[in-house]
Each structure stands twice: as C-alpha cells, then as structure tokens.
Amino acid sequence: QVQLVESGGGLVQAGGSLRLSCAASGNIFSINVMGWYRQAPGKQRELVADMHSSGSTNYADSVKGRFTISRDNAKNTVYLQMNSLKPEDTAVYYCNMKDYAYWAGKDDYWGQGTQVTVSS
C-alpha cells in the first residue's frame, strides 16, 4: 500500500505562484508515474501534469508554460510549481501515483487533496 500526503495549497492573487508537494510512503516501486490532478466545483477531475520515474513529463495544455512538475526519486516526492496563476486554476489539487499494480489492472493511489484558490 502507498500513502500520498500533499502540502502547499492556499490562497493567492492572480499572477502569483504556489508550490505543491506530495510525499509518498509505503510499498513504493521504483518505476512509477507521479502526477497532479485537479477538480473544480461542478467539473470532472482532470490531469494537470505527471512525470514518469524516468523523467518524462506530460502537461495539460491549459498549464503549459506556467506550471512545472518535478520529482525527487530519493525522497519519493513530487512537486508542482505553479506560476502566473489564474482564477480558473482554482480547484482541489490531488496527488496521484500509478505503478505496476495499476498497469496490471488494480487501483492507483490518491492523496487527500489540497485546495488552491486564485483570486482575481
């Protein structure tokens, strides 16, 4: 089992920055994908960015050029640096991990979520 704990959300004005962190613990396999999803009120959860343990990344078009995902494999931690924030970035941000179990058909792992609110 894997546990994910997020931190770093909060309230920021439009144009500001925030950095989210997600620390994983438990039975972690070295090959995995860690990422961030978000869910705004009344909307479906959507991928923001993810990063394979090999270093490859994937971003939603809406955040390209503004958000940067990174990870420290030694610390089993993934980060999301969010710059030039917009009110439409307001959402609960969830950390996610997928590993071999997921790719074999089992559930992936989720954090509890952290609120990001961007005021105009």
Image (cartoon, rainbow, N blue to C red):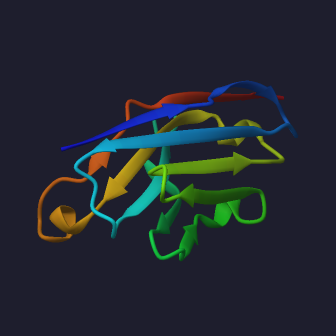
Q: Is residue 105 left or right of residue 14?
A: left
- Whole-percent x, y for residue 47 in the image: 48, 57
Image height check: is 74 above or below 53? above
| Front in this rendered view, residue 28 or 38 | 28
Q: Is residue 44 visible?
A: no
Q: Is residue 13 visible?
A: yes
Where is residue 33, by image quadrant? Answer: bottom left
| Front in this rendered view, residue 14 or 51 | 51
Image height check: is 116 above or below 32? above
Which residue is the extreme one toward the front? 74
- Whole-percent x, y for residue 117 in the image: 67, 27
- Residue at (54% x, 74% y) in the render: 55
Which residue is the extreme one toward the left? 105
- Residue at (62% x, 30% y) in the render: 8
- Residue at (56% x, 72% y) in the render: 57
- Whole-percent x, y for residue 103 in the image: 20, 70
Image height check: is 114 above or below 48? above
Where is residue 59, by image quadrant? Answer: bottom right
Image height check: is 96 above or below 10? below
How many numbered circles does the render carry? 0
Give the quadrant of the C terminus.
Answer: top right
| Front in this rendered view, residue 53 or 8 | 53
